[in-house]
Amino acid sequence: MKSLSLVALLIGSFAFADAPSNLLKPTGKEDSWLFQQFGTGKGSLKADGDAMVFTITDIDDTNWHVQAVQNGLDLVDGKGYVLKFQIKASEPRNVSIAALIDQDDWHVVGLAETFAVDKDFSKQEFTFTASNTVPKKNRLNFDLGEAKGTVTVKDVTLTAK
């Protein structure tokens, strides 16, 4: 019995060692996110277990005027990445996701997508190749300012391919 347990432990260790490393901070921690508001866009964020709930209370005509960001990413030109997460909203809406540099001119570095979000959690997955990055000065943006209400995300991972 002991040898079987040791074999299971060793197999589990090898499987874990091969798992890609998440480049993002934990989803369900408020200090993992930079919540930005511009123009008349307003809102807040609040952890809910392992999820993050973003509440959008005021909007204008620019969806990125309310955004949730994870910055300080060290993306590498020519390298492939996979972004996965689950997302839902209080009412159907569109959300935009982008990988950008985290400095003026804020250009896209390989990912810029808009997708529909509904009232039930849906799994999202985006694959991209990074380009025109700046070492340790890249960011992941969720642009949330299309509509008032809440957007909840969980299990957000960004891994190298």
Image (tube, helix red, strand yellow):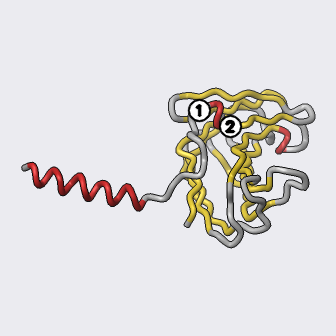
Residue 110 position (above or below residue 13) = below
Q: In what element is the residue under mark 1?
A: loop
Task: Tell me the residue that label 1 is attached to.
Answer: 29
CA neighbours of label 2 inside 10 A, class few (<14), some (14 to 19), many (20+): many
In which quarter of the view is residue 118 placed? top right
Residue 113 position (above or below residue 51) = below
Badge 2 amino acid: Trp
Measure the C-alpha gap from mark 2 to mark 1.
Answer: 8 Å
Could you tell me if residue 108 is visible in this image? yes
Toward the viewer: 58 or 27? Answer: 27
Where residue 113 appears, as percent x and y from the top left, is: 73, 58
Residue farthest along the bottom direction in this orientation: 78
Task: Tell me the residue that label 2 is attached to.
Answer: 33
* Mark identifier at residue 143: none
User: Tags 2 and 1 in contact by the CB under 8 Å rule?
Assistant: yes
Badge 1 amino acid: Lys
Q: Residue at x 55, y 67 (%)?
A: 161
Toward the viewer: 160 or 148? Answer: 160
Where residue 35 appears, as percent x and y from the top left, is: 75, 35
